[in-house]
Amino acid sequence: MIRVVIFVLVLGLIDFYAYQAVKTTFRNKWVNIAYLVVSLLVLGNLIYQMLTFDRGTDSTSSLNLTFGLVVTMYVPKMIMMMLMFGEDVFRVPQAMYRYFSTGGTIENGSYLPSRRKFISQLTLGIAAIPFASFLYGIFKGKYNFKVLKYTMHFEDLPEAFDGYQITQISDIHSGSFDNKEKIEYAVDLINQQRSDAILFTGDMVNNAAVEMRPWKSVFSKLSAKDGLFSVLGNHDYGDYMRWDSPQDKKDNLEELKSIQREIGFDLLLDDSRFIERNGERIAIVGVENWGKGFKQKGDLKKAAKKVDAKDFKILLSHDPTHWQEQVIDDDYHYHLTLSGHTHGMQFGIEIPGWIKWSPVKWRYKYWAGIYEEKKQFINVNRGFGFLAFPGRVGIWPEITVIELKKGIKPS
């Protein structure tokens, strides 16, 4: 309750400053009233959700929508607050000068200079940019699927796999979906790549297996010649939901595993598989979730016990911090690791060849795209679905297609 009160007080302070820009710009009581009513409704809904949400029974969709509204409304207001506060940096010294220069005698009702309409108009104009961006992200961006294609060269790739193509998807988060037509489109888009194998790197649900039931038939249409392989992500274990008993939590995980099998995924729980061609093979190794600050259940040694050091290895590991903390320095050389988890924070700016930025980079060193360390590579998929904020801005849902080539990368 104390945290709720503090949070609401902070938002109230932000609202107070943002209101100054609205009041100064429009000077219309009905606009002012509308602003206050909308703010109270958003805050009231937030308080209601925070006090009544039950992690054991409630769907996360209403909480996601609430969070989306708060972000959409209050990030622009925070920008407004900073700009209006910047104006106060000049207004307050002027007020102090007036006070002392007049000996404390009020002349015009206030020592504080009036806010300049131009500053308020500029503030509203600047705040409109993130406001519109968030609205786009909620209504369009979350299903703005992008196919990102890479060609990767390895000198020790078996000859038979020269030109082998894989598709990676990650972070489905089916409990957040609200548009079946868009998901069907995305599944068709995956199949259109005609990859030899499809690899899924975890987080099929937000919390519970029941979230995937309505989408099982859609994802069952996924197909690839050499099969579908998957691992679990931190959300798949049900750790963020209150269960009536440990057995219920265990049953939930078993149901999710069963759903994955029904869809057609070969779920790798600290295990490996081989894909063979013309007497040569590559290894697909999959670990359970291992993340810095998250569940650390994965056992890399156990997962690779059937794999030889000389095998060409593709590792599926949900959290990229596993690659950073354990995989890079392992005795085995893992040629390519596929991860997800970060979602690219679902917000950022990416202009190929110029800029790639998201606040998530302050938390994760490897957060989106391909990285190389010690002649080993990782691709961090930006995610298929969305979580918490019901949208994406600048960091679009991703389907990764990687072609493996034998040899040295052309300069």
Image (spheres, rainbow, N blue to C red):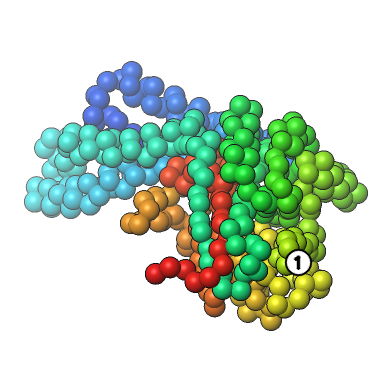
292 vs 405, left or right, is right
Graded by Cα atoms within 10 Å as few (under 14), some (14 to 19) or many (20 or more), the crowding at tag 1 reads few
Q: Can you say which quadrant of the picture contains the C terminus?
A: bottom left
* Residue 399 percent location from the top left of the image: 56, 46
Q: Residue at x 33, y 35 (%)?
A: 128
For numbered disc 1, what is the local secondary structure? loop
Toward the top, the furthest residue is: 30
Q: Residue at x 44, y 32 (%)?
A: 135
36 vs 378, left or right, is left
Amino acid carrying mark 1 in the image: Gly
Pick the residue in front: 322 or 127.
322
Toward the right, the furthest residue is: 247
Residue 20 appears in the rendering: no
274 vs 376, left or right, is right
Q: What residue is disc 1 on? A: 279
Measured along the vertical axis of the image, is residue 96 above or below residue 18?
below
Residue 181 appears in the rendering: yes
181 vs 141, left or right, is right
Q: Residue at x 73, y 63 (%)?
A: 278
Toward the left, the furthest residue is: 101
- Snapshot quadrant of residue 283: bottom right
Pick the residue in front: 128 or 2.
128
Measured along the vertical axis of the image, is residue 146 above or below residue 151?
above
Pick the residue in front: 210 or 228.
228
* Residue 206 percent location from the top left of the image: 69, 44
Toward the front, the furthest residue is: 278
In this figure, what is the number of numbered marks?
Answer: 1
